[in-house]
Amino acid sequence: MSDSTSGDLAPPTDPLAAWPNTVRWQRVSDDLIWVELIRLSTVFAVLLGGLGIGWLWTGNRLFGAGIGLAVLLWLWEAWVTVRGVRAWGYAEREKDLLVRHGLLIRRLTIVPYDRMQFVDVTAGPLERAFNLATVQLHTAAAATDAKVPGLPAAEAARLRDRLTALGEERPEGL
Amino acid sequence: MSREPADAAPAPETPPSPPLVEPRHRLHPLSPLLHGAKSLVVIVAALSWQTLGQVGFGRFVGLVVVLTLVAIGLSLVSWLNTGYHVVGRELRIYEGLVWRRTRAIPLERLQAVDVIRPFLARLTGLAELRLEVVGGGKTEAPLAYLTTAEANALRERLLHLAGQLHLTPTAVAAPTGRQLHVVRNQDLLISQLLTPQTFSLPIGVAVVLHQFLAEGASSFIAVASTITATAGIMFQPIRRVFDDWNFRLTRDGSGLRLRRGLVETRTQNVPLNRLQAVTVTWPLLWRLAGWVRLRMDVAGYAGPDQGGSEQVDRLLPVGDPAVARRIVAQVLPGVDLAALPLTPPPARVGWLRPLTRTVLGAGLSEQVFAARHGLLTRHLVVVPYARIQSVRVVQGPLQRLLGVATVYADAAGGSGAAALHRDLTEAWRLAAELADRARAARS
C-alpha cells in the first residue's frame, strides 16, 4: 500500500506501533476499564430505568423495543470502552514523552521534556476508589494533547516527579 | 501676590536618599481625564436616544456631565492608587483602593511590548504601554497613560532587561532602527478593496434597491437598515485600512518594531526569539495583483478565537512575494520562502482532497518546518524547530483506509503547522525527525 517505503525505518505493522524496535509502550491500568464501565453503566441505568417505568406505565411495546436497543448499545459501548482503554499507551523515552490513544481516530503525541510547562495530576472519586489518577502534561501550545489516564497512584506520582525533574533541567519554556 | 516667588525661592528640593528599591512611579496626571473622556462615549450610548427624547436636551446634557464627572472622579481615585516600578527582574504594578492588587510580571516571560496612542492621547502627547506575557488570555498590565517619552524609555528598559535574561543567544544584533519595509498606503487601500466584502457590496445594495423600487416604499427604516448593513459589511476592510495605515517595519536591536495606525498609532516591539510562527496567506482576489499577507504568532497576543483583537498579529498587511521573502529572511534568519522543500502528499490522497491535493505540501528545511494548505485562500505556515512545543500524528478512519496520516507541529500562540495526509511511513519519519530537530534546536 505504501508507495514510498524508506529503507531506514521498518514499516510499522500497526499504525500506532511507531518505531516498534525502539519504543517500549506501557499500557494504562486495566482498572480503568472498570471506571469507564461504571461511568457508562450509570448513564445507561438511568436510561433503562426511564424506559422501564414508561413500559410499566403505558404497556406500549415500543418501550420494550427501546430497552432492547439500549441494551445492545450498552454492550457495543462497553466493547468499545474495553478496546479504547487498551489502546491508551505511553512511553517515556530518553528525551521525550509519547502518548497514544484513540481507536477510530488514532492519535500519537510527542512532547520533548524541555517543552513542558506544568504537570496536572487529577483523580475523581471513581478513579480514587480504584486508586487511579490522570496525569496531564501541558506545554505552551494549547493544542498539545498529552494526557495519560488510569495510572496507579504510585505510578502517577513517579511519572509526575520524573517529568518535573526532567523539565527543571531546562527552565526556559518558550 | 508675591507668594509664588516666596514659595519658589526656598524650595529645598531635597532629593530622597537613593533607596534600595526604586520608588513607585505614578501614571500621568492627565490619565483620569482621558479615561473620563473615554467613558463619555459609553455614557451617551448607554443613555441612548430614547432618554434624550424623554428628558429633553438640557437635562440630557446635565445628566451626561454629571455622570462624566463621576467617571472622572472614580478614575482619579484609581489613579491615586496606581503605581508601578521595576524591581530586579520584574515589573510590579499596584492598583486598587478597596481590592488591592499587586501584579509582579517576570520579565523573562515578556513576549512583546506595545505602545499605543489612541486619538485623544495623541492630542495630549500621551501613550499607553501594554505588556504581552505568555499565559495571560488578555493583555496583561496596560499602563495608561504615560507621556510618550516615558513610555518609550520604559519600553526600552524592559526590553533591555528582558533581553539580558534570555538564555538563548540571539542573532547578531542588527544596527538599531534599520528600516525593513514600508507599506504604501495606496497598496493597502487597493488590497482592502480586493476583498470579498467589497465585491459583495454592490450586489447587496442592488438587492435592497430592487426591493425598494419593486415595492415603491422607501421608508426611513429600510434606508437606515441598508446603511447599517453596509457599514457592518465594510467594517473589517475599513478597520484594516485604519489600523495598518503608514505601516512600517523596523529591525531594532534583537527584535522587530512595527509602527502603524491612522487615528490610533500602535508601536509593537517583538523580540525575534519570541516569534513562534509565521503564516503567509494568499487571498483569492489578491492573486490578481500577486500580493500576499504575513502574520506572526506571538505567544502573548491573544488570537481572535480567544476574544482578542485580530489586529495585533500583522507582520505585513500587503506586499508582493519578493517583499515577503525579504522580510521572512530577516525575521527567521536563513529561511528562504521561495526555496522551501515542499513535497505533495501521495497521489491516492486525491480521493480525500480532489481539489487541493496539489496545494497540500510539507517539508523540512534547515531551520523550519513548513506546511501549505487551502484552496481559495492559501496558507503557508512556517514554524522554527526551536518553537515547536509538541508533535502529533493523527489518523482518522478514512485516512487509515488510504494509509495516510496528518502530522501536526504545535506552537504556542497559534495553531502551528499541519502536514496533511502524508504517507504513513513518511508521517512516522516526519514526526520522529521533528521531535529530534525540535530538541536539538534548543540545546
Image: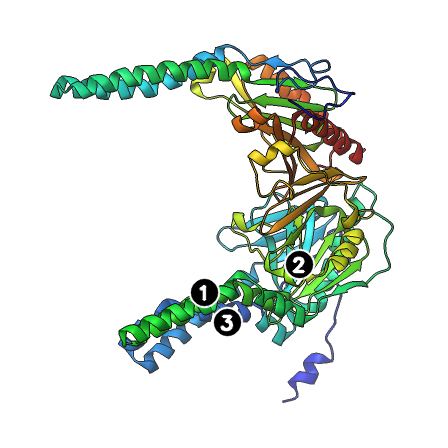
Chain where mark 1 sits = B
Residue under the image location 30 percent in, 77 percent down: B218
Sequence-first disc among 1 and 3: 3
Q: Which residue is mark 3?
A: B37
**Which residue type does callout 2 highlight?**
Asp
Which residue sits at x=53%, y=22%? A102
Using a 10 Å C-alpha cutoff, classify the residue at mark 1 as few (fewer than 14 neighbours), some (14 to 19) or many (20 or more). Answer: few
Cα gap from disc 3 to disc 2, whole angstroms: 22 Å
Q: Position of residue B236 (x, y in %)?
A: 53, 63
Query: Marks 3 and 2: which is nearer the front?
Result: 2
- From the image, state whether disc 1 or disc 3 is nearer to you: 1
Same-chain check, marks 2 and 1: yes
Q: Is residue B44 visible?
A: no
State the image coordinates of residue B209 (x, y, percent, origin top left): 37, 73
Task: Looking at the image, tell me whether mark 3 or mark 2 is earlier in sequence order.
Answer: 3
User: What number is the disc on residue B114?
Assistant: 2
From the viewer's side, name the closer residue of B305 and B40.
Answer: B305
* Gap in angstroms between the C-alphas marked 2 and 1: 28 Å
- Res A89 seen here: yes
Residue B232: which disc?
1
Q: Amino acid at mark 3?
A: Ala
Front residue of this view, candidates B274 and B68: B274
Q: Quadrant of residue B359?
A: top right
Q: Within the image, what quadrant is residue B5 found in?
A: bottom right
Q: Earlier in the sequence, mark 2 or mark 1?
A: 2
Q: Chain of mark 2?
A: B
